[in-house]
Image (cartoon, grey):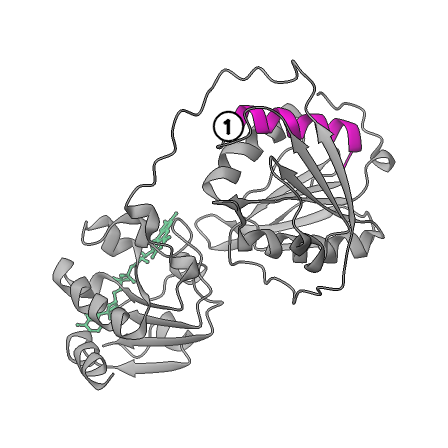
């Protein structure tokens, strides 16, 4: 579809693209619905959850969706970005949403830029804030820019839909209201609407992908101070005591002491755990944007005056190689 000479009044409602993992709704879906709810309320419109392949789940309504648009076609089992892109293009052309929000997950990052190009809409990736300009009604899409040193607010004034991605754990999911219900619209992708050059033969889970920091209860994270992989073994013992996972700064990942899936920050994962223990991480902005929403932040550093020590709820000044074993022992 090509949208030129846009009549913005034709476009209405805030859409979110529902994300599923292993047949279950990914929690980021509810975070997107919460964000879309506020935007739709500001525009006097509705929130629609788009389910590509599968069925609408009642939880979509409980978290704030007014309608679910379910689209199915042969080949929707397993992720196929070409097919899903064709389905979204079809739905966007037919229903004309004003905004489309998608999770910045591996699937979302593969899917939504294709849709943005094909609908000539533009896309703001990894937004940390979304709001409506009260004067123009445009979506204000805020995200870190220039290595996280400034926050840029981007608007898409001349194209529709306005499209943005949001990483998991950046927005808060609203409390569910099980008494809410909504309308379900079933759609079928017309035959021939997709080129479908790809076929998913098999889905294989890599060992590293099982490190899911975003779902951990607690994270014990290490930085350059850990000096090597042995330092991370020490952190792992503390994390195990807490039933948590090990995170890392980019300095530690770049040094090869710990694998990339552990990295927290702008170019790693965004986490929102109840407890985050930063061990010898100075707290540069690119790290902080990935963990500053955690419930309780504990920092351990020799230097009491780092950004991380200033941000922390509990700042412990001292040597990580003395303090971490003592904490593990005490637990
Ligand atoms: C575009 C871009 C993207 C980036 N993305 C990320 C990202 O996603 N995640 C990320 O983490 N970084 C990222 N960075 C890098 C970031 O800017 C920092 O360089 C990095 O976070 C620093 O890691 P660190 O805190 O471990 O190291 P340092 O800044 O060197 O801090 C080490 C800390 O350990 C303390 N220390 C040393 N020895 C001990 C000891 N024995 N006991 C206690 N404390 C000790 C020091 O006092 C210091 O505070 C990015 C940078 C750029 C430009």
Question: For this view, does 191 lie left or right of residue 150?
Answer: right
Q: Residues within 10 Å of mark 1 (few under 14, many from 20)?
A: some
Q: Is residue 314 above or below residue 114?
A: below
Secondary structure found at label 1 = loop
Please state the horizontal and vertical placement of residue 127, each as a whole percent of the image.
57, 50
Within 8 Å of ligand 1, the CB of disc 1?
Answer: no
Q: Which residues are magenta?
A: 80-97
x 56%, y 55%: residue = 128
Ligand 1 falls in quadrant: bottom left
Count the numbered circles shown: 1
Please state the horizontal and vertical placement of residue 131, each as a whole percent of the image.
70, 55
Question: For this view, does 118 lie left or right of residue 132?
Answer: left
Please state the horizontal and vertical placement of residue 260, each as a whole percent of the image.
29, 48
Q: Quadrant of residue 231?
A: bottom left
Q: Is residue 297 above or below residue 75?
A: below
> Circle 1 is placed at which residue position?
80
């Amino acid at each position: 579809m090509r949208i030129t000479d846009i009549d913005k009044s034709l476009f209405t409602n805030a859409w979110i693209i529902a994300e599923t993992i292993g047949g279950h709704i990914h929690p980021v879906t509810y975070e997107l619905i919460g964000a879309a709810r506020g935007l739709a309320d500001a525009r006097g419109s509705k929130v629609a959850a788009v389910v590509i392949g599968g069925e609408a789940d009642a939880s979509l309504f409980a978290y704030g969706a007014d309608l679910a648009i379910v689209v199915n076609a042969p080949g929707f089992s397993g992720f196929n970005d070409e097919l899903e892109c064709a389905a979204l293009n079809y739905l966007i052309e037919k229903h004309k949403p004003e905004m489309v929000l998608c999770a910045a997950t591996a699937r979302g990052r593969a899917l939504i830029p294709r849709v943005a190009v094909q609908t000539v809409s533009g896309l703001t990736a990894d937004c940390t804030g979304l709001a409506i300009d009260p004067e123009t009604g445009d979506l204000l899409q805020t995200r870190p820019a220039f290595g996280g040193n400034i926050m840029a607010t981007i608007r898409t004034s001349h194209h529709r839909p306005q499209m943005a991605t949001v990483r998991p754990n950046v927005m808060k999911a609203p409390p569910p209201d099980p008494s809410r219900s909504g309308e379900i619209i079933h759609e079928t992708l017309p035959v021939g609407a997709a080129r479908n050059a790809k076929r998913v033969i098999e889905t294989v889970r890599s060992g590293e992908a099982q490190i899911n920091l975003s779902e951990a209860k607690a994270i014990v994270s290490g930085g350059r101070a850990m000096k090597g992989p042995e330092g991370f073994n020490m952190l792992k013992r503390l994390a195990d005591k807490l039933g948590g996972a090990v995170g890392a700064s980019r300095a530690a990942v770049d040094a090869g002491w710990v694998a990339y899936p552990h990295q927290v920050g702008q170019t790693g994962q965004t986490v929102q755990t109840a407890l985050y223990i930063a061990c010898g991480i100075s707290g540069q902005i690119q790290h902080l944007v990935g963990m500053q929403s955690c419930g309780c932040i504990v920092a351990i550093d020799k230097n009491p005056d780092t950004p991380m020590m200033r941000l922390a709820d509990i700042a412990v000044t001292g040597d990580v190689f003395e303090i971490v074993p003592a904490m593990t022992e005490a637990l």
